[in-house]
Image (spheres, helix red, strand yellow):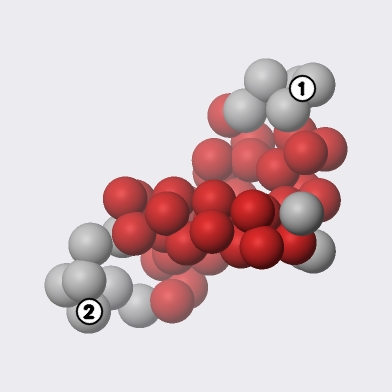
Amino acid sequence: MVQIGSVLICTVLMLLYPMDGSPLITAVDNILRLVHVAPPFLQPLLVMYIYQ
């Protein structure tokens, strides 16, 4: 289960942040924005994946 979560996060990161030297802060900011715009019933799942 941990591996699935890690692969999912890595895939999302690769899709959202192309390798253009974007600072990590921007990536974290985008993840937080993604969690905020997620449907309420998905927010706990996203948080569990991120902080696993």
Q: Which residue is mark 2?
A: 21
Residue under the image location 44 percent in, 50 percent down:
12
Residue under the image location 54 percent in, 44 percent down:
33
**Residue 6 position in % (x across, y down):** 61, 62
Quarter assignment of residue 52: bottom right
Residue 50 visible here: no
Instruction: Reply above or below: 48 against 20.
Output: above
Q: Which residue is mark 1?
A: 40
Q: Alpha-carbon distance for marks 1 and 2?
A: 32 Å
Three-letter amino acid code at the position of disc 1: Pro
- Using the image, tell me which numbered label, if any, was put on residue 6: none
Judge the density around disc 1: few (<14), some (14-19), many (≥20) Cα neighbours within 10 Å: few
* 24 on left or right of 48: left
Instruction: Reply above or below: 40 against 29.
Output: above
Under circle 2, the secondary element is loop
Residue 19 visible here: yes
Residue under the image location 73 percent in, 28 percent down:
42
